[in-house]
Image: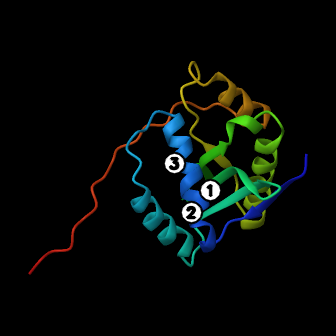
């Protein structure tokens, strides 16, 4: 199987948002607003500091996988690191090594950016055992659950 991996750019907004929407739908998130996704993706990919990036996997001319990464800084990571935000492989081509290729692209990208680590928030291990096993097979170490607190965007003061 001939799979090509390439870094996404602003011309790939439709592909990126479509793949992430499929992932979220599979995970049970029904509140996917495609217009909002496109706006956010355009903003994130357009930032000068490259804090967000994506790699796409293609089989022939069809996009069959995506991995998105964001950069963070922390003392516990002893510097700069990366987080896998989304990883999705089209169901009919899973278990064919595409995830491995996307993880390899993420690792190489992280090394080139000087990251000290890559982290991922995996879904519930009981429900998504294959996903957690995949990450462990790729060398990731389980360190505990991730929690979130949703912040509301500040609105500009109308004066």
Q: Which of the 4 quarters of the picture holds residue 125?
A: top right
Q: What residue is at 50 percent from the left and 64 percent from the top?
A: 41
**View extreme (right): residue:** 1
SS label for mark 3: helix
The residue identified by callout 3 is 21
In this rendering, the answer to whether 90 lies above or below 136 is: below
Q: Is residue 130 visible?
A: yes
Q: Are marks 2 and 1 in contact (CB under 8 Å)?
A: no
Residue shown at the point (62%, 55%) measured from the top left: 68
Please identify the quadrant where the N terminus is shown: top right
Q: Which of the marked residues, 3 or 2, is nearer the chain's N terminus?
A: 2
| Mark 3 or mark 1, whichever is nearer to me | 3
Is 80 rendered above or below residue 92?
below
Residue that protrudes farthest toward the front in the picture: 61
Return the disc, 2 or 1, that comes first in the chain's sequence: 2
| Along the line of sight, the residue nearer the viewer: 31 or 119 | 31
Quarter of the image that includes the C terminus: bottom left
- x and y percentages locating residue 5 in the rendered image: 80, 58
Instruction: Using the numbered discs, state the Cα–Cα distance from disc 3 to disc 1 in whole angstroms.
Output: 16 Å
Numbered disc 2: secondary structure? helix
Disc number for residue 14: 2
Q: Which residue is mark 1?
A: 69
Q: Nearer the viewer, residue 50 or 5?
A: 5
* Upstream in sequence: badge 3 or badge 1: 3
């Amino acid at each position: 199987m001939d799979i090509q991996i390439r870094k996404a750019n602003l011309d790939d907004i439709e592909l990126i948002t479509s793949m992430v929407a499929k992932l979220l739908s599979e995970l049970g998130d029904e509140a996917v607003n495609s217009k909002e996704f496109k706006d956010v993706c355009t903003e994130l990919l357009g930032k000068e500091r490259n804090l967000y990036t994506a790699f796409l996997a293609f089989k022939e001319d069809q996009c069959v996988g995506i991995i998105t990464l964001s950069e963070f800084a922390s003392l516990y990571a002893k510097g700069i690191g990366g987080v896998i935000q989304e990883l999705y492989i089209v169901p009919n081509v899973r278990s064919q090594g595409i995830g491995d290729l996307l993880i390899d692209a993420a690792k190489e990208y992280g090394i080139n950016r000087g990251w000290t680590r890559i982290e991922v928030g995996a879904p519930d291990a009981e429900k998504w055992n294959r996903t957690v096993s995949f990450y462990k097979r790729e060398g990731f170490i389980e360190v505990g659950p991730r929690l979130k607190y949703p912040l509301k965007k500040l609105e500009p003061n109308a004066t």
